[in-house]
Image (cartoon, coloured by chain):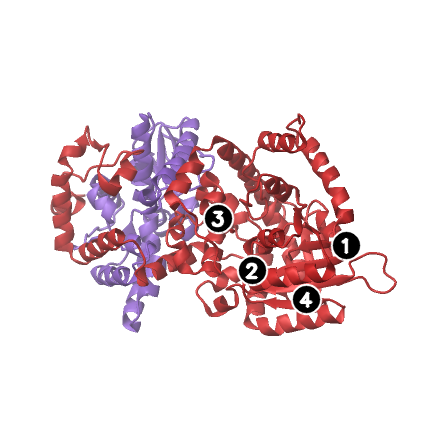
Chain colours: A red, B purple
Amino acid sequence: MSETPPPTPLRERARQALQDTFLHEALTIATTKFIGLRREAFGEFPDGEALRDRARAIKEATLQHLDQHLERLIDNVERRGGQVHYATTPEDACRTVLDIAKRTGARLAVKSKSMATEEIHLNTALQAAGVTPLETDLGEYIIQLAHERPSHIIAPAIHKTKGQVAELFARELGREIEPDPEVLTRIARAELREKFLIADMGISGANFGVADTGTIVLVTNEGNGRMVTSLPRVHVAVMGVEKVIPSMTDLAVFLAILAKSATGQKLSVYTSLVNGPRRGGELEGPEEFHLVLLDNGRIRQIAGPLREALSCLRCGACLNVCPVYRQIGGHAYGYTYPGPIGILLTAMLNGPASVKDLAHASSLCGACADACPVRIDIPRMLIELRRSVVERRIAPWPERVVFGVFGRLLRRPALYRLAARAGRVLQRPFVRRGAIRRLPLFFGGWTRTRDLPPIAARTFQERWAQLAREDHR
Amino acid sequence: MVTCLGDMFYPEVGETIVRLLRRLGVAVDFPAGQTCCGLPLFNSGYHADAAAVARRTVALFEAAEAVVVPSGSCAWMVKHEYPGLMTAPADRAAAERLAGRTHELSQFLVKRLGRRQFHSAVGGQLTYHDSCHLLRGLHESESPRALLRDLAGSEFVELPGGDECCGFGGSFAVRLPEVSAAILDKKLTQVEATGADCVVACDAGCLMQMRGGLSRRGSRVRAVHLAEVLGDAR
């Protein structure tokens, strides 16, 4: 099953987002801060550029033999007493988790932040089956209270101001709460602590799965990840198949660039290495450990046009620098994964038709590719997606007509010149004091906010004969 | 190569460039039959049409020793995308030859001609907006700045967020006009905050976007092409 397409068109969603002044304030503050911190972190780290290349090379090499790495990961997880499940679709993945919950009698599941579980809409499935999911990452906790979905890959509540969070908490607790991040965090912590102790199940994602050792790696800042993976009697990790890496040496390469790209930290506060269930003589850890390997359109892309996107570390750097994301935020994209990489992942998960419009939610400025720690050429793939939309003939027909005519004009210079002359005549009623301030049809989108220059009285080509004669010495 | 926007909307920029190059001792020719480099077709996914446009453009410039382009995005298209659009080996070889001989204006002046010292044609204070394709496509940030910094009679100030997109993005500007305008708004606020008289760009697309926004705002700041601020060589 694919994700449900958003009910309103992209342009309308974007327009609504632009009108949200809280969103604008929150996004500007957060993304500006992330951009600065990232720049600083790499500025102080001369090996950064080489490590980015190295990281990409590791990802590429791993994709070459993904089956073998996954087999090794599975063997090693099982050797350590964990159980591995393979899920082709979101339904498979949810069913697997629900089966485990049912068999172990789980009623409350604490979760650490995971986009993979968002992607399969696990919370909805858990709720429907009578298991209460509780998000324990602060950002996720906030949006769960607000009945929303993450609007950023690593900062799910980035769209909320601290004032809005305080209001939300106040509503929930029925008392006045001051909009101070420290106070808010303390309240959330107090609420969550108790839940960690009574939860039956912990659900996490996975930043990496190390094949050599069967280790699941979680990168977090709040420490909730290690509680989720160690306190409840069952731990389930849901991991996209592309997250497997060969060895601990490789892990070191990724850890060196991941937090720097994401939050500008040298390392995140917690890096948890999960090595399966509790073993004899160990004091902590779950009784059962399950790893759910999720395909959901990924495997197909190993030989597909979106292959590069399988290297994504989910750091969110491309969102922070994207001029479009910075204006409209994550929800306007309409699917689980927002931002430039999100468009590619949406296409991966739901097919290229799902991003028919979204593929154009980019000015192709290239800031995303520049910020990406593994140098994914996002603009190139957006163009590829646009091409596949055109070639499947699912682009809107007026657009196809306009571009069809345009393409012909550009191949026939006489027609092109004729069009310039025709444009000069047609524009006459609209030119006021050397500028066009209002135009009908889709040009109106431009002129509503910007002036348009009129086609010149004489184009350069028409001036050339004279210019060629000019005595230039 | 005049480019479609340069031809139709900013012919005076083309004239200025011809005169500038002649003053520097460059013999300028203008092959007839130019239209557009095909970038709008390419970016929107109409690659068969873009390839047809590319093939005829390559043929037009076959004889040129060097091709100077006043827009970073068109230069990027020719240099980076033309070869890949060609299927026949001979076409590809021709496209690669053209790619190697094609230069964006600021790069041509600074890197090919080695000329960076000019008198200012406009005076006042100037700031610079990095066009995305020039900056991140052709990895060029220094040549235009070198020209502007050395300009006699004008003062250069850096634009905070100068490397951020102006929101043009070709068809993006009409597909999501409100988003495009919001991005532009931020850019223009930053431009105005520098106190500069002109914001200089090396791309007709950015110019169209920024000029359109500035005139709608009734701003005193002008958006100008690099060529328009370069007067006589020093």
| Mark nearer the N terminus (3 vs 1) | 1
Apparent side of residue B113 relative to residue B4 in the rendered image (left or right): right
Mark 3, mark 4: which one is toward the viewer? 3
- What subunit carries mark 2? A
Residue A388 drawn above or below residue A65: above
Residue on which the image places disc 3: A339
- Using the rendered view, name the quadrant where residue B207 is placed: top left
* Amino acid type, callout 3: Gly
Residue A247 image label: 4
First along the sequence among labels 3 and 4: 4
Q: Nearer the viewer, residue A102 or A366?
A: A102
> Distance of mark 3 from mark 1, alpha carbons?
33 Å
Q: Earlier in the sequence, mark 1 or mark 2?
A: 2
State the separation of the CA atoms marked 4 and 2.
17 Å
Q: Find residue A53 and name its label.
A: 2
**Position of residue A103 measured from the top left corner of the image (x, y, whole percent):** 71, 62
Do callouts 4 and 2 mark residues in contact (Cβ within 8 Å)? no
Q: Earlier in the sequence, mark 2 or mark 3?
A: 2
Farthest residue to the right: give it.
A281
Instruction: Give the image quarter of residue A292.
Output: bottom right
Q: Residues within 10 Å of mark 3 (few under 14, many from 20)?
A: many
Residue closer to the observer: A251 or B78: A251
Q: Are marks 2 and 3 on the same chain?
A: yes
Same subunit, labels 4 and 2: the answer reads yes
Q: Are marks 3 and 4 on the same chain?
A: yes
- Mark in front: 4 vs 2: 4
